[in-house]
Amino acid sequence: MRIGINGRVLQESISGIPRFTLALVEGLAEPETGCEVHLFLLNRPFAEAWVQERLTSNPRIIQHFSRWSGNSYLSRALWDLVFLGLEAKRHRLDLLYGPSFTVPWIAPCPTVVMIYDLTLSKAPLLSRRPSWLLFKAFHLCVLLPTVTRSAEAIVTCSESTREDLVRDYGVPMARIHVIYGGVEESFRRLEDDGYVNEVLQRLGIRRPYILNPSGMIPRKNQRMLIEAFARFRLLHADRYQLVMTGSNASHYVRQVRQQIKHFGLDQDVLLLPFVQEQELVALYNGAALCVYPSLYEGFGLPVLEAMACGVPVVASSASSLPELVEDAGLLVSPRDEEAWAQAMYSVLSQEYLRRELAARGLQRVRKFTWQRAVERTLQLFRAVLEVGRGGGS
């Protein structure tokens, strides 16, 4: 089976959708699958050098670099929606997979598209600039309706997103297939406390801490978390520090910093930039608790990463997170500061509960593997091709 995959997302970052895409590319290229993977890329480097090294080392992954640089949204849209279809015809693909919301409007072979989430319609606005509002309108009113009609099958990574597509876009339930992502093997309980302590010292962490691992954007709900932490400190004095990753120079982060100052938490909240994977594993391992109060998620990978590292989790009760967590963590409304303060206090003041949640998390995360995701994706691809050959209705 000659499978084409739009690899553009691997040239933009290596979290969320790109992480899912990388695992799928590598898994489909294993010899036992019988697949030949054609990875279509823009004329630009990968987001991380190690990604290119891993992909280049596998002869069953054939990389095709375009002359297009994709430096603007318009050029990327033309690549995704028009020229990728021409590439599929030129390389005589059996199936074309779009891992990030798009497949060509006209394609010479069956297409499958991943709708990772509906963030643009469900989450707070990132910007009110005319260009951003135009992008949002095109994505929601033109792109999604067109793609969900033209693709032979749609993949989501949660039942929550599947239900949103059915309700908001009228997509038949039978055309949407839920395939959960997995967790990289590097996310695990570390035996080397020395390495963990070295990372914590280097990052300026000197006290027991609660970890909030996410990008700092409005839907991740850090401003609510700051207020909840201020209330939590009334119960737990100054023993714990709150460590938040993903800090940047945005207006939203400036608001978070102002809120930290307002509550007098300058010495108790540490904002870190995005951290490399090795450091992130150490941060999980050193944390007393992981908190994830997001307003909306298509999946919620950090919750599973924390569980894999043996850290108890308190997560939002919104969107996809309850189906990931189930009874392996505490679920709290993302708009209830007092409930979050009480949940953090309950876990950190009761050793039995903390150990119980950590153990449940380790058990729960075993259900989420990239191997299972690849197997289910390959089954779907084969079913789509079988229908295309007249083997199904």
Image: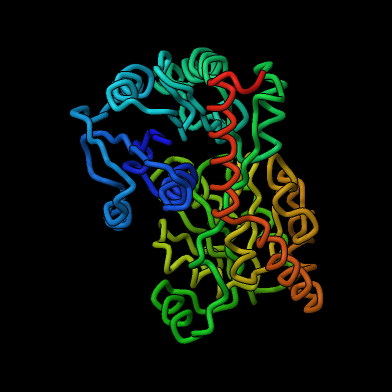
Relative to 261, 179 lies left or right: right
**What residue is rendered at 63% in x and 55% in y?**
368
Res 354 quadrant in image: bottom right
Relative to 72, 288 lies left or right: right
Tell me residue 377's x, y (percent): 56, 40
Tell me residue 76's x, y (percent): 32, 25
Q: Nearer the viewer, residue 379 or 364?
A: 379
Q: How is the image coloured?
A: rainbow
Q: Nearer the viewer, residue 346 or 34?
A: 34
Can residue 289 be seen in the rendering of this structure? yes
Q: Nearer the viewer, residue 86 or 386?
A: 386
Quarter of the figure that contains the C terminus = top right
**What residue is rendered at 39% in x and 76% in y?**
202
Tell me residue 385's x, y (percent): 53, 27
**What residue is rendered at 54% in x and 53% in y?**
370
Res 218 quadrant in image: top right
Establish if 195 lies above or below 26: below
